[in-house]
Image: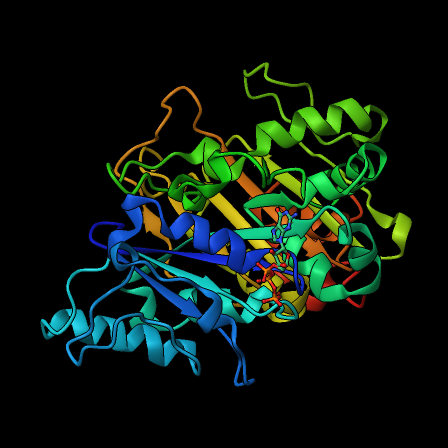
Amino acid sequence: MSSAKGRIPVSIITGFLGAGKSTLLNRILKDPVMKDAAVIINEFGEVGIDHMLVEASNDAVIELADGCLCCTVRGELVETLAMLIDGMQTGKLKPISRVVIETTGLADPAPVMQSVMGHPAISQHFDLDGVITVVDAVNGLKTLEGFSEALRQVAVADRLILTKKTLADDAAINALSDRLKELNPRAAMTDGDSEEAGRAAVLVNGLYDPATKIADVDRWLKDEIAAEHDLDHHTDEHHGHDHDHGHNHHDGHHHRHDVNRHGDDIRSYSIIHDQPIDPMALEMFLDILRSTHGEKLLRMKAVVALTDRPDRPVVLHGVQSIFPQPVRLPAWPDPSDRRTRLVLITKDLPETYVRELFDAFTGRPAIDRPDRAALEDNPLAIPGLKI
Ligand SMILES: Nc1nc2c(ncn2[C@@H]2O[C@H](COP(=O)(O)OP(=O)(O)OP(=O)(O)O)[C@@H](O)[C@H]2O)c(=O)[nH]1
């Protein structure tokens, strides 16, 4: 298992065409903290002018040995990241504190996230810190209705930044905010006009505080925040599946979030389990989920208690079928809360299917459901697999 020590956080700034990504990036680059950051403008091979619009200030750029000032690169992201590692290892580049990638407006962020997380050589050096999605208050709602890329950008975000609020009326802003909370109740929401939006701190959304390298599971999973939202709006939707774990933050731990009203089926929910899990059972659960429905798994984050070392939780995250090597934490960040917590964002994948699969492997019996032994024998035995 890998550790976070010495790894470089990578932030992805995404958002639909014209939402304000470059404007935001320009502001953030003025933060002195960004002086050792590398910026990659991901053009996906298109001829783009975005890189010319980023006013890289002297403080915010990496000096390459050949005198090239700004690491503004088009082309393959993996090659670019590999080039950064090579540059640092050979001393041609000074150490980079952070990488920021700005995607094109039409990008599905998943391949960008996978480039950071899925490549063995790259994921050894870089950690996906988070996805920051810029949403335009004027056009955001329409864009979400018309473009699946925009939906995905919002669904996988760790933070949403709402721009152009001065150009929109309150009713439109409220409608958009509600929709964003439905699609992604766990994302932190930042006002694009605020001072905060222009600070490098908005890029910090990962498991580790880059300064201390200490894991902040609560901030990363944000399941408690989402739970409040769920309880506010969907108190009648909990199904009878809760576990007694001795915490009283909220009554139920399985949060159904129905966002079907626009015809999409993006859901965000968490699974909580209070007993340590057999590592093999976890592996089988993930293997089946990935191999049968990987493309529907927009994002997953988890902290898991395993039976082999229940005192040292394992952290994992994944995008579609790509899961980097899990990280073993030295200890539980909050020793009073040793529950396994999985947060999933899925598209067209019924929540009950994921729950039943998890329950089958973690040994919670049910009369009408195959258990782990039956699934290992025949993974197709799980009901709903043919969805
Ligand atoms: N009023 C207002 N205008 C904004 C704001 N953010 C961006 N803009 C304007 O919106 C336009 C598009 O902004 P960009 O930063 O280029 O947007 P982008 O997302 O990088 O655009 P693409 O790269 O084309 O996808 C520009 O004219 C900006 O000046 C904002 O918060 N308020």
Q: Position of residue 75 (x, y in %)?
A: 44, 83
- Quarter location, residue 168: top right
Q: Is residue 212 depicted above or below 224 in this figure?
A: below
* Whether residue 97 can be seen here: no
288 lies left or right of 57: right
Q: Is residue 359 left or right of residue 39?
A: right
Q: Residue at x 43, y 35 (%)?
A: 217
> Which residue appears at 51% of the width and 51% of the height?
24
66 shown above or below 348: below
Measured from the top left, where is residue 348 in percent x and y? Answer: 78, 60
Q: In front: 346, or 225? A: 225
Assign ligand 1 to one image quadrant. bottom right
Relative to 224, 70 lies left or right: left
Q: Residue at x 26, y 71 (%)?
A: 69
Which of the 4 image quadrants contains residue 385?
A: bottom right
- Quadrant into which the N terminus falls: bottom left
Percent from the top left, x then y, of residue 303?
Answer: 45, 41
The residue nearer to you, when weighing 194 against 296, is 194
Relative depth, front residue between 166 and 303: 166
